[in-house]
Image (spheres, helix red, strand yellow):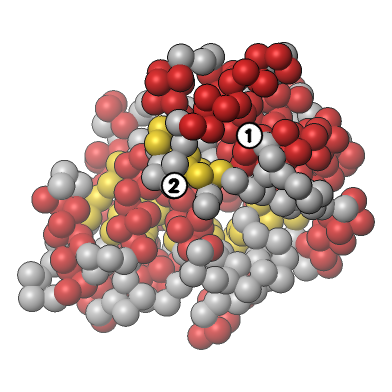
Amino acid sequence: MTEVTLPLKERLAWLRLIRSENVGPITFYRLLDQFGTAQKALEALPELAKKGGRSKKIRICPKNEAERELEALDGLGAQMILRDEAAYPPLLAQTEDAPPVLSVRGHSHLLRKKSIAIVGARNASINGCKFAGQLARDLGEGGLLVVSGLARGVDGAAHAASLASGTVGVQGGGVDVIYPKENESLYNEMIARGCVVAEPRVGTLPQARHFPRRNRIISGMARAIVVVEASPRSGSLITARLALEQGREVFAVPGSPLDARSKGTNGLIREGATLIENAEDILSQLNSTRNMALEERKTPYDKRGYSMPPCEDQLRDARGIILKSLSPTPVSVDEIIRQCQISASIVQTVLLELELAGKLERSPGNAVSLII
């Protein structure tokens, strides 16, 4: 594979853009498609936010702030990998809301390996942790990288058992923040023998809102996800749903109906997840032809096609119509295009303006809603 690394100036611009106010991953890529480079997108942000109805100036990440973040990573012996660079996890790069930048500590070459995610309850049973560890060990020996969330319980057991074959932990906070503290020894081993990645900036303390975003990275990196134990409302089930949306296979380990930690996994099986009892069940399924559809790489950065933005006259006429079609209840962008009978490029541009103005929120399934 040809190495792809963006020039330092554009890397800084990518980091500044994703760290700017109201710019999430999907907005980031819309901006990149429309303006061609992150630098040009940065220059366009104030005017776009103003057209979306923002009265005060949008905060754009200063260059020196981005430089300090890169320096902090360097001081940790870490690095930043951009979505369009060859070192970025190949399957994650396919997802619509892939993090534009990832902070990485440890052995970054592991990110290119074919991977499997193992997740489960933080308060897992002794048998659940033991099974997760055996599964991770066997899958690692079968040639797969084990990905999980570095949490207590099933995550920690899976990581510890697969250190020898390769494992990646995805953080909810900054790549340098150890959470939970009881996993400090495991975290240090991961840095020495495995790899740790994070989407938030260095030093970010994990908060509840960070974990669903972390979960979509776990599932996005993997060819499939295995849920070992999970209560009906656990984060592991969120990860499983995200995996299905991303076109990944979902495996689940059955458990006793008397144990609340098995209700989530048993429910997944009822809904169509594949029941597994050992690593061979997973390996044979992944090696079948129907599981080979996932591509290993997206179009390289320098070959992406850029779209021409609509003219101002078209946008002026469309803004009121599109705004009236929105409400606090999420609606799909495709439905807006159909109902308003306005071209996709115009709708996307107006939605971009509203989002940068802080008036629009994006939801899974390409849906948007007004922020009241």
Where's residue 17, x and y in %? 76, 44
Q: Is residue 191 above or below residue 337?
A: below
Can the viewer see residue 345?
A: yes
* Pointer 1 or 2: first along the chain: 2
Where's residue 70, x and y in %? 83, 57
Question: Type of residue at label 2?
Answer: Pro
Quadrant housing residue 279: bottom left
- Compute the Cα span from label 1 to label 2: 17 Å
Q: Dot 1 corresponds to which residue?
A: 352
Mark 2 element type: loop
Left or right, 340 with reference to 138: right
* Quadrant of the frame with the N terminus: top right
Q: Is residue 365 above or below residue 263?
A: above
Instruction: Determine the residue positioned at 36% across, 40% down.
Output: 245
Q: Which mark is residue 210?
A: none
Viewer-side residue, 276 vs 173 = 173
Can the viewer see residue 296?
A: no
Viewer-side residue, 216 vs 130 = 216
Where's residue 197, x and y in %? 61, 58
Nearer mark to the viewer, of 1 and 2: 2
Mark 1 element type: helix
Outermost residue, right side: 64
Pointers 1 and 2 in contact (C-beta within 8 Å): no
Q: Is residue 284 above or below residue 194?
A: above
Instruction: Determine the residue positioned at 86% across, 58% down.
Output: 65
Q: Dot 2 corresponds to which residue?
A: 328
Question: Type of residue at label 1?
Answer: Leu
Outermost residue, left side: 257
Where's residue 308, x and y in %? 70, 14
Viewer-side residue, 278 vs 73 = 73
